[in-house]
Image (spheres, rainbow, N blue to C red):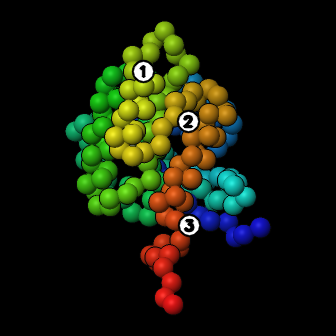
Amino acid sequence: MPQPKSRKIAVLGYRSVGKSSLTIQFVEGQFVDSYDPTIENTFTKMITVNGQEYHLQLVDTAGQDEYSIFPQTYSIDINGYILVYSVTSNKSFEVVKVIHEKLLDMVGKVQVPIMLVGNKKDLHMERVISCEEGKALAESWNAAFMESSAKENQTAVEVFKRIILEAEKIDGGAPQGRTPCSMM
């Protein structure tokens, strides 16, 4: 088996959209129901995707709003971004658009591995953002998209597998700083 690859993923979004719950469900396999605002937590987990082992470092960020200054640390050595909104909150959907703009400005790259996640899909009666709206936004960003529920381990795992695939697609599997070109 090839050497494990290290990847650093940042999880961003408005407050109380389920960033920490999604991350903890993936890392520990349990749902945390209580809301305890995060300042910033880092989790690590090994995962195998398509036969390649990855050592993931997950940066679970503080909830942001449209006025938050995008921390420069979120643009350094990050291989992919998971942008989370709640399907039960118009505000979180609007804020995720602002976070995306700030992210692109800070990173300064044309192609950035991004996964847009509509969380809390299990709350059917409270839904205000349709799956189609989320999908359309992701397509306009050229980003991956899925809806999830932090209560379900399978969707949480799928979110993190998908961002690894997005990062590898853009990175081309090439080591950082090198182009996959060869001189003949």
- Per the model, the C-alpha gap separating discs 3 and 2 is 26 Å
| Residue beneath disc 3 | 173
| Residue beneath disc 2 | 22
Marks 1 and 2, the one that precedes in the sequence: 2
Observer-nearest of 33 and 10? 10
The image quadrant of residue 96 is top left
Left/right placement of residue 58 relative to residue 84 reads: right
Secondary element under disc 2, as helix, strand or loop, is helix
Marks 3 and 2, the one that precedes in the sequence: 2
| Residue beneath disc 1 | 130
The spot of residue 140 in percent (x, y) is 34, 40
Secondary element under disc 1, as helix, strand or loop, is loop
Image height check: is 24 above or below 118? below
Observer-nearest of 112 and 58? 112
Frontmost of labels 3 and 2 is 3
Observer-nearest of 75 and 136? 136
Image height check: is 107 above or below 66? below
The amino acid pointed to by label 2 is Leu
Quadrant position of the N terminus in the picture: bottom right
The amino acid pointed to by label 1 is Ser
The spot of residue 158 in percent (x, y) is 62, 40
Left/right placement of residue 102 relative to residue 7 reads: left
The residue located at (38%, 26%) in the rendering is: 133
Marks 1 and 3, the one that precedes in the sequence: 1
The spot of residue 145 in percent (x, y) is 48, 38
